[in-house]
Image (cartoon, rainbow, N blue to C red):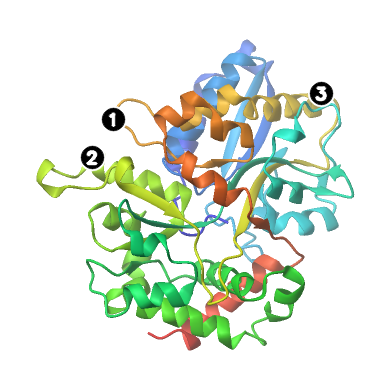
Amino acid sequence: MNYLIRNTFVAFLFISHFITGCIAQNEKTDKRRDLIVSLYPYLPNTSDLYWKIETDFEQKFPEINLEVQLNSWYYYSQDSVKKRGINFDQADIYELDCVFLDEFISSGKIQKIPESINQNTTDYLPLASIAKRNETWYGVPHWVCGNFMYYKVGDNEIENVSNLKDLDEVLKNSSSKNGLLIDLKGKSTIGELYLDALFDEFGSYQRVKPFLSPDNINKTSVHNLNKLLALTADSLGRIDNYHDRLGYYAREFSKNEGRVYVGYAESSYYMITEQLQSCSFEDSCLVSENIKIGEWSMSNNGSNPIGWVDMFVIDSSVSGQKLDDAKSFIEFMMLDDTYKSILIPGWNESPRYILPAKSNLYSDSELIKNAPLYDQFYPIIKKAVPVTDLGLNYNLRAIGKKLDEELLTK
């Protein structure tokens, strides 16, 4: 659930569709088959990414007119008045955060993945198994994500941290230069961090589930969240303006502000972009070789990392030729070459550092050469536990709202 790296709704992409539609009213275009795909909106450099996907796919399948939708209200699943969440989208294919999977299955919104789709399930990371029920696949896993701890090469004290108590001992009484950088604003952001803290405290979803209600919030996990906040300088993580700035805390870490940063893998894009585009030689911003990545603990009991899976699912109404076209798109997106075209940066660009659901890519020499941090993400994400349940997104946002307003230290 990519809450820490928020992107805006990409008007550029939709304008391009509008212009293309106005210009291309000719016989050739009329014969193309439409395929509507609602893709995940919160990824680095979204407009360039999805423009590239659309262009590359249509070059390979010129008979298909790919229409990409991005829903900037993706997680507003309970907005039944304005109907803005991903569950209100109408498309042929959805790129679905696993937090919604049980709801999409139970409502009949999606169908089983056809067995004819070419997917090598042995390539998937363990947490990708969340996409199936009783050996039946309802989604094709594409990306995964979770929180990581970033620190600097040579910081042995941080490297030896194994739980929240250790981190508190190292970082207490910190200044902005050597404290914790973490975003602790926003309903979704706080709700997910609370879930992360619960898993670190209790270890399994069965033990965590009783505390996934705004009426039964676990006091120990709230205490641990407040302890994290105390490790930031001047409650830095609770500033609305910084929460709304794209990649703010990652950029600050790149500039050597803070000793530890916590965030998603794709926030690395903003770190490296800061160094490539904004830092002078005198600034001594961090480069990939200076960055270490470790497991993140929000409890004195150690770490039990959770992860989220973004997967392709097919609308239940899709059949016939459109189903064949949907299969073509999903298979195209799951090619190693397609992944690498997305993840390997161009000249003077940062890698996006989105985490593939396919484990074989983490040892791909071409990818590692161009995006070396993948080698550090892999041992952590491969043991992450996926989470989904009916109403989970709503409950996490409700808990996040309550913590934001009432319980977290201001």
Q: Is residue 229 left or right of residue 154?
A: right
Give the image location of residue 232, x and y in percent.
33, 74
Which sits earlier in the primary sequence, circle 3 or circle 2? 2
Residue 141 to residue 195: above or below: above
Task: Count residues near mark 3 (Cα–Cα under 10 Å), then give few for <14, some for 14-19, many for 20+.
Answer: few
Secondary structure under the numbered disc 2 in the rendered image? helix
Residue that mark 3 sits on: 321
Give the image location of residue 153, x and y in percent.
32, 51
Question: What residue is rendered at 43% in x and 39% in y?
Answer: 352
Give the image location of residue 69, x and y in percent.
58, 41
300 or 391: which is nearer to us?
300
Q: Spatial distance from mark 3 to mark 2, Cα to Cα? A: 46 Å
Q: Amino acid at mark 2?
A: Gln
Secondary structure under the numbered disc 3 in the rendered image? helix
Q: Amino acid at mark 1?
A: Asn
Residue that mark 2 sits on: 277
Residue that mark 1 sits on: 348
